[in-house]
Amino acid sequence: MKNGSLDVMLHEKVKTAANLDWTARKKIAIGSARGLAFLHHSCIPHIIHQDMKSSNVLLDDNLDACVSDFGMARLMNALDSHLTVSMLSGTPGYVPPEYCQSFMCTTEGDIYSYGVVFLELLSGKKPIDPTEFGDTNLVDWAKQMVKEDRCSEIFDPSLTTTESRELELYQYLKIACQCLDDQPNRRPTMIQVMAMFKELQIDSDSNFLDGFSIDSANIEESSEKSV
């Protein structure tokens, strides 16, 4: 892919001379969410990626995102809620907290990892960076900022150019936080994430969500739950 991976574009700005503004980051967040939604809901059997991270989000000339690297992926029957694994997989900083206790592979785990990628886009920070977070990580730091009502400190300063932009970032941060809920059953599905993006862009001239229908997504979601 011409623009390489998201982690290089986002975290090695000097090397790439890339400037990912908010429009670009929003497009990448939506594109990677669409990719995971396809794996979780449209593929039969469903696919659990198991290693969703910014280095596995590849970007083409137009910054369209492609979820890559299926070396750890697992196939899951639509009737199953999880797969039991014998060893942990994933990348530190992206692994959901429940994996260390349950050794269960779930779509909810992918959703947590996606939330980390989304938080990277919002903050411009790496998931693990001792110079920034010491012994903690990006997720725990961001959750503490939210708890202390200091959300504005989470956002990449290059994104908060206007008050209206900061208000928009808050709305997207809420989605990221839902994906990062410590309780897997409280995280939205990727179709629900796409629907939330759609709601936020109803009054926008953006075409990032062309072809995605909230109504059809709700129908697909409800049919899966009724299986």
Image: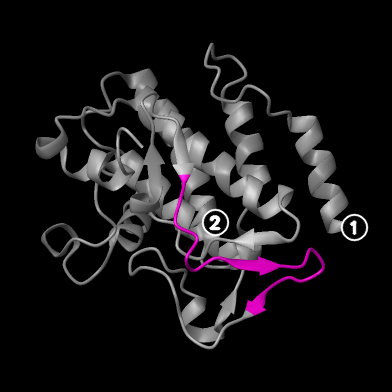
Mark earlier in primary sequence (1, 2): 2
Q: Which quadrant, please, contains the C terminus? A: bottom right
**Disc 1 from disc 2: Cα separation:** 21 Å
Tell me residue 134's x, y (percent): 16, 67
Number of other residues with Cα within 10 Å of mark 1, as a class: few under 14, some 14 to 19, many 20 or more: few
- Is residue 151 visible in the rendered image? The answer is no
Point 58% across, 32% down: residue = 197
Return the residue nearer the eye: 89 or 151. 89
Identify the amino acid type marked 2: Ile
Tell me residue 92's x, y (percent): 33, 70
Return the residue nearer the eye: 186 or 144. 186
Residue under label 1: 226
Tell me residue 171's x, y (percent): 48, 34
Return the residue nearer the eye: 66 or 120. 66
Where on the picture, by quarter, is residue 58? top left
Residue 178, placed above or below residue 194: below
Residue under label 2: 111
The reply to whether discs 1 and 2 touch (Cβ–Cβ < 8 Å) is no
* Residue that sits furthest to the top in the current view: 205
Q: Which quadrant, please, contains the N terminus? A: top left
Magenta region, residue range: 67-83
Where on the picture, by quarter, is residue 14? top left
Q: Circle 1 — which element?
A: loop
Point 36% across, 25% down: residue = 61
Identify the amino acid type marked 1: Ser
Is 145 included in the stretch rendered in magenta? no
Q: Image check: 65 left or right of 204?
A: left
Q: Image check: 82 left or right of 126?
A: right
